């Protein structure tokens, strides 16, 4: 807390010299600059110069006029203000890099933070609490966020309440839902953290490749309104938890959009990131899309296909897709370029070329195709490099690139020709062969066999497959007809295109919990209060037991015991049922000895009871011997022996002794 | 009353004569002022900003010779992206002959050149594409500088007689009715073997938005060949005293502009007897060069989806 105060004081002292009016005006100016920046989508490429100008202006305004110090040149202050502005300039640029590394944080969150948490206005708000205007705006800002949070929270709770399907609202349920969400987010973050080294590795690879000039990017056609590709959205489960005896059903919406190339989609289901087999897919597992389609799809995991525990189950779509990309570049006669350069004239400026560094434009979809041809204008007397990078733009996987075509003007052809084809380097050895526009289905649509050369990746060569992040091909092109390439003009604009067909897999998962049992609880009756619950679903205790009303008991526990007297009954034989809720004590001669529970018996008599032994065959000695022989009964409690024969203090139970013998004692004479 | 009326008529007559003379003088200078040559621009909405694939659309280029020299050797080159556009009507390269401003044509001649273009079908799944149309003009042009200068035989004012005129530097910021202009002429008198050699330091500036080239490579500049290193910024300079028809020697006689500027020294090598009285004469300096300028306009081609 003390530290927070210190920081606050430091900020206040930093901004102390600003007059109230100046600060209010400055605050408005910072907001205007932020709005302008936001209006241009925080563009740090074409707008960089303007953006830098605006933020540097703000920094200098702050340092020299608004928060001016006693010293004319307070370098610390100037540096701090410029530093803040630098942060404003660099943050949107960094966000794209950060999301590549911290994949756990969605891009939308970072964009939201940049949009709704402008650095300069917030600094002014929280460092000038004395300024009424700024204070008012600051309070409004916090209330605005509170309002947003409340609406968001309310919507979430409402959704959960609607889904309860109960006659009365259980207050704890929404909280449980929120808790589950919190747990899920925590799990996601944990998963993200676990994946962090891998993501850093990927980002590192990209940076290294960029540094080596072997990673090329592109932009989606900004004017394209169509959302091309295949998407699975709104994935939901019938419930957040299921019983293992029940089928588990999840569903989602499949959205597919293509313009020209038909898409075939194969739907599947996943269980813990692996393909699930015991599933039923509804309405069908294959879709053929010619244009666009939106369809609800369901996956039902049959009974007991998901064991007890937590599972990530999902919907999966395998589909073929086509991505096209093009890049334009400019060609000039070598001497012409040199002539202009020798006079310090930029050839592209001279020919009024606005797009001086044209980038690749690719069609929307799961794969970004980045292209690079080097810095234009290219000279017509030499070969040049053509770099192609396929980047996995979505969360899924590029399973395999089935076709790849390179389209170029017919005055250009691929270099690096070998006996088995035209070779491109990179991660693998890629081989191409000559093809035609009709092979792609592009004849008269941006590709004419009379004006274009087409090369196709050979199916016999190494294929591009299982691309987790990106893969780059490095090709070389030769100009075979410089005059034809230029035509009649000194600066010719030419297009190079790449068409890639590939199979892609996307999946969306949702977490479900499977509980053991069938969802039905066993009800104990009044005499079962001490009985151990053996049902996975739990048991319900009878009224009057120690467990509270409606309280459920889990497997392995009991209701805590009946309302007995606390005394056990000593059973006199081994076959009688125990009717005491406190339990009973069995005889030593029973198969079960010691204490038994209510409604159990002692399991009958022991079979191997002694029928002979040593003892005193007179007075009290008879008592013990009689007892032995009397207990030797059959399972029906019938006496087995009639008397005892005893000689020299050695006795044996018998049925055959003559009753007149002095050493014989009938059991009926026993004491 | 009659005398007053006669005086009034006379004043009016004389004034009229004066006004007439002044008008002719101003007009003559006006044609040789300005820093524009052949002005090139796309016509409004030709080409349009957006077209759809397979659309045929017009492109118009307006050319106005706002300089004082008649173009007899000029070219217009249309540069379109052949992957995206087809020329349906017109030719990519055409020659130009456009008269400049003169007494008979005070505003200069203007021409409009129209083309008909067709947007090619876009590739599969390409929704929009921006194509650039470039137009380049290349023409031979001339700058004429004609001013009265003083051949001051007493440059250092050593003679004890009144001079008819004194040597002065001439500065001109208005140009001479051409994109390349002479911005300043400094007058000097060099004495050599009892002979005075009038010397003029000529400052040349490219005030236009285009590029100066050798007048001999005008056609090449509007072709796939483009420029050679020697041709860029190349200007031929010549000078003479118009009254006497005497040529001056300019060094160098072919100058290359550097940062759009160059300086030339022109000397009357024959010299003048230093005992001769100072006198005024017309100095004419001519710059011969080619000039080329490019404009461009983007067209967004949209797919027919």
Image (cartoon, coloured by chain):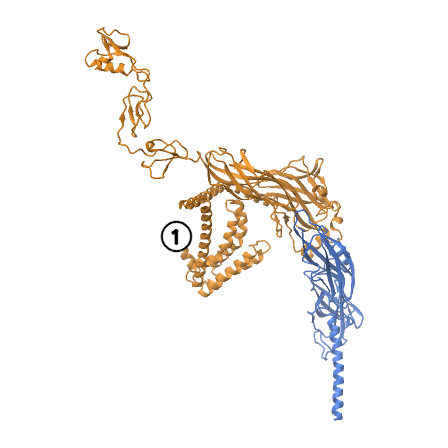
State the image quarter where residue A399 is shown.
top right
Secondary structure found at label 1:
helix
Q: Quadrant of the C terminus of chain A?
A: top left
State the image quarter where residue A422 is shown.
top right
Does residue B42 sit above or below B275 in this rendering? above
Residue corresponding to mark 1: A3
Total marks placed: 1
Residue B140 position within the rendered picture, expressed as x and y whole percent measured from the top left: 77, 62
The chain under label 1 reads: A
- Chain identifier of the blue chain: B
Q: Residue at x 19, y 14 (%)?
A: A620
Q: Residue at x 75, y 58 (%)?
A: B115
Return the residue nearer the eye: A95 or B146. Answer: A95
Left or right of A327 on screen, residue A658 = left
**Is any atom of residue A135 visible in this view?**
yes
Q: Residue furthest left?
A: A619
Residue A411 position within the rendered picture, expressed as x and y whole percent measured from the top left: 74, 46
Left or right of A70 on screen, residue A277 = right
Q: Residue furthest right?
A: B245
Residue A406 position within the rendered picture, expressed as x and y whole percent measured from the top left: 68, 43
**Is any atom of residue A273 visible in this view?**
no
Return the residue nearer the eye: B291 or A667. Answer: A667
State the image quarter where residue B204 is shown.
bottom right
For mark 1, does the 10 Å Cα neighbourhood hold few (<14), some (14 to 19), or many (20 or more) residues?
few
- Chain identifier of the orange chain: A
Return the residue nearer the eye: B177 or A506. Answer: A506
Residue A456 position within the rendered picture, expressed as x and y whole percent measured from the top left: 69, 40
């Amino acid at each position: 807390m003390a530290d927070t105060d210190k920081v606050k004081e430091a900020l206040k002292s930093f901004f102390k010299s600003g007059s109230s009016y100046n600060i209010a005006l400055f605050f408005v100016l910072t907001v205007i600059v932020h709005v302008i920046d936001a209006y241009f989508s925080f563009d740090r490429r074409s707008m960089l110069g303007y953006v830098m100008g605006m933020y540097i202006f703000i920094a200098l305004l702050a340092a020299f006029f608004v928060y001016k110090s006693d010293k004319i040149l307070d370098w610390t202050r100037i540096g701090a203000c410029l530093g803040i502005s630098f942060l404003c300039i660099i943050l949107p640029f960094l966000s794209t890099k950060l999301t590549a590394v911290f994949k756990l944080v969605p891009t939308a969150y970072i964009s939201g933070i940049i949009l709704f948490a402008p650095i300069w206005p917030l600094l002014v708000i929280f460092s000038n609490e004395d300024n009424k205007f700024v204070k008012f705006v600051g309070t409004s800002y916090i209330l605005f966020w509170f309002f947003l949070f409340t609406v968001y929270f309310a919507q979430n709770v409402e959704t959960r309440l609607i889904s309860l399907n109960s006659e009365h609202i259980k207050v704890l349920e929404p909280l449980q839902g929120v808790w589950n969400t919190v747990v899920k987010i925590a799990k996601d973050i944990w998963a993200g953290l676990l994946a962090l080294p891998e993501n850093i590795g990927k980002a590192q690879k990209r940076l290294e490749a960029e540094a080596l000039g072997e990673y090329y990017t592109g932009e989606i056609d900004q004017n394209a309104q169509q959302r091309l590709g295949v998407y699975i959205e709104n994935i939901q489960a019938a419930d957040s938890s299921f019983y293992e005896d029940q089928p588990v059903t999840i569903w989602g919406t499949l959205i597919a959009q293509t313009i020209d190339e038909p898409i075939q989609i194969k739907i599947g289901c996943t269980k813990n990131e692996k393909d699930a087999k015991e599933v039923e897919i509804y309405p069908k597992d294959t879709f053929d899309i010619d244009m666009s389609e939106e369809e609800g799809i369901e996956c039902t995991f049959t009974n007991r296909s998901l064991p007890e525990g937590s599972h990530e189950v999902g919907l999966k779509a395998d589909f073929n897709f086509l991505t096209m990309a093009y890049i334009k570049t400019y060609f000039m006669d070598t001497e012409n370029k040199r002539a202009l350069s020798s006079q310090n004239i930029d050839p592209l400026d001279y020919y009024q070329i606005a797009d001086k560094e044209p980038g690749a434009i690719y069609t929307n979809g799961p794969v970004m195709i980045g292209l690079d041809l080097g810095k234009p204008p290219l000279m017509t007397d030499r070969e040049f490099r053509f770099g192609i990078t396929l980047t996995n733009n979505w969360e899924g996987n590029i399973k395999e690139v089935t076709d790849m075509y390179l389209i170029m003007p017919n005055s250009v052809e691929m270099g690096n020709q070998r006996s088995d084809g035209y070779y491109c380097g990179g991660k693998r050895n890629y081989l191409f062969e000559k093809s035609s526009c009709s092979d792609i289905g592009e004849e008269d649509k941006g590709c004419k066999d009379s004006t274009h050369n087409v090369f196709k990746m050979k199916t016999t060569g190494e294929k591009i497959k299982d691309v987790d992040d990106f893969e780059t091909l490095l090709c070389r092109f030769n100009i075979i007809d410089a005059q034809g390439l230029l035509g009649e003009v000194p600066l010719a604009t030419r297009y190079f295109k790449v068409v890639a067909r590939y199979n892609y897999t996307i999946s969306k998962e949702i977490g479900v919990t499977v509980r053991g049992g069938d969802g039905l609880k066993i009800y104990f009756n009044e005499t079962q209060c001490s009985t151990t619950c053996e049902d996975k679903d739990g048991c319900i205790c009878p009224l009057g037991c120690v467990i509270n009303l409606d309280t459920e008991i889990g497997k392995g526990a009991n209701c805590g015991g009946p309302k007995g007297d606390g005394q056990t009954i000593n059973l006199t034989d081994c076959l009688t049922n125990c009717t005491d809720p406190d339990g009973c004590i069995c005889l030593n001669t029973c198969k079960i000895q010691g204490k038994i529970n209510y409604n159990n018996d002692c399991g009958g008599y022991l079979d191997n009871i002694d029928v002979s032994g040593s003892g005193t065959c007179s007075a009290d000695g008879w008592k013990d011997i009689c007892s032995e022989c009397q207990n030797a009964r059959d399972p029906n409690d019938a006496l087995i022996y009639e008397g005892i024969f005893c000689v020299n203090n050695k006795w044996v139970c018998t049925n055959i002794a003559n009753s007149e013998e002095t050493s014989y004692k009938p059991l009926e004479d026993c004491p | 009353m009659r005398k007053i009326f006669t005086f009034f008529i006379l004043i009016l007559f004389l004034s009229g004569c004066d006004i007439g003379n002044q008008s002719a003088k101003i007009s003559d200078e006006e044609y040789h002022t300005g820093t524009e040559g052949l002005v090139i621009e796309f016509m409004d909405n030709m080409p349009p900003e957006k077209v759809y694939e397979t659309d045929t659309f017009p492109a118009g280029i307006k050319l106005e010779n706002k300089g004082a020299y008649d173009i007899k050797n000029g070219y217009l080159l249309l540069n379109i992206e052949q992957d995206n556009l087809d020329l349906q009507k017109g030719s990519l390269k055409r020659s130009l002959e456009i008269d400049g401003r003169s007494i008979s044509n005070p505003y200069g001649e203007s021409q409009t050149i129209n083309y008909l273009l067709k947007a090619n079908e876009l590739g599969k799944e390409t929704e929009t594409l921006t194509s650039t149309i470039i137009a380049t003009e290349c023409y031979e042009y001339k700058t004429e500088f004609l001013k009265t200068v003083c051949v001051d035989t007493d440059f250092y004012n050593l003679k004890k007689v009144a001079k008819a005129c004194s040597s002065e530097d001439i500065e001109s910021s208005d140009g001479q009715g051409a994109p390349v202009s002479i911005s300043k002429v400094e007058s000097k008198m060099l004495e050599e073997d009892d002979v005075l050699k009038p010397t003029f330091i000529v400052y040349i500036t490219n005030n236009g938005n285009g590029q100066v080239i050798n007048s001999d490579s005008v056609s090449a500049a509007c072709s796939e060949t483009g420029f050679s290193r020697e041709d860029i910024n190349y200007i031929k300079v010549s000078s003479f005293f118009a009254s006497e028809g005497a040529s001056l020697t300019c060094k160098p006689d072919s100058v290359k502009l550097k940062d759009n500027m160059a300086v030339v020294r022109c000397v009357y090598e024959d010299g003048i007897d230093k005992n001769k009285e100072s006198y005024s004469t017309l100095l004419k300096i001519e710059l011969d060069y080619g000039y080329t300028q490019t404009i461009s306009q983007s067209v967004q081609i949209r797919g027919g989806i």
